[in-house]
Image: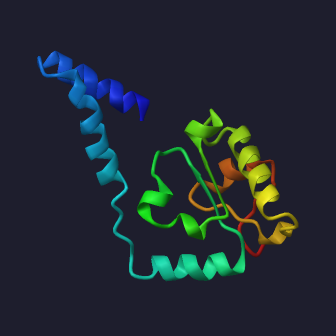
């Protein structure tokens, strides 16, 4: 987000435009970034999954789950910006695990899962704390 703001300000300055327009331009980008069109089964699936086990969101991106309207499905959220490191750095997985354990103490090992990243990198970075659901 900070890099995008700086890039917008630089582009505006290079064009002789008012740099003060960088923030409204970023807000337009960020608003569009958080306008998500879901697959038909995505929200019902999130609802069912959240009823079965605590869900966690771990992202290198800057999407805002509250603005998207799906934050209630997740027990915890951790972003790279917030953690100060990005996937596949083990520290971001550790931050997520700590937050998830605080939010949902007692989640059994077999009921933890990580989706959306490569298995080898995930398992190496998470130190084996996470595994595909049901294994």
Instruction: Determine the residue located farthest toward the left in the rendered image.
Output: 16
At x 40%, y 28%, the residue is 3
At x 48%, y 77%, the residue is 43
Q: Is residue 10 above or below residue 124?
A: above
Q: Position of residue 30 (x, y in %)?
A: 34, 46
Q: Position of residue 106 (x, y in %)?
A: 88, 67
Q: Position of residue 111 (x, y in %)?
A: 78, 71
Q: Nearer the viewer, residue 25 or 119?
A: 25
Q: Nearer the viewer, residue 28 or 46?
A: 28
Residue 5 falls in image quadrant: top left
Instruction: Classify residue 16 as left or right of residue 30.
Output: left
Instruction: Classify residue 23 as left or right of residue 16.
Output: right
Task: State the quadrant of the C terminus.
Answer: bottom right
Task: State the quadrant of the N terminus.
Answer: top left
Q: Position of residue 82 (x, y in %)?
A: 60, 39
At x 39%, y 81%, the residue is 40
Residue 85 falls in image quadrant: top right
């Amino acid at each position: 987000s900070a890099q995008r703001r700086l890039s917008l300000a630089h582009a505006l300055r290079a064009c002789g435009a008012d740099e003060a327009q960088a923030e409204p331009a970023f807000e337009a980008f960020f608003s569009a970034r958080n306008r998500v069109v879901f697959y038909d089964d995505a929200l019902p699936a999130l609802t069912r999954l959240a009823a079965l086990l605590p869900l966690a969101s771990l992202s290198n991106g800057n999407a805002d789950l509250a603005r998207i309207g799906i934050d209630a499905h997740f027990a915890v959220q951790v972003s790279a910006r917030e953690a100060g490191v990005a996937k596949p750095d083990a520290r971001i997985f550790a931050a997520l695990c700590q937050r998830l354990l605080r939010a949902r103490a007692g989640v059994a090992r077999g009921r933890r899962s990580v989706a959306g990243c490569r298995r080898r990198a995930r398992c190496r970075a998470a130190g084996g704390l996470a595994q595909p659901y049901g294994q």
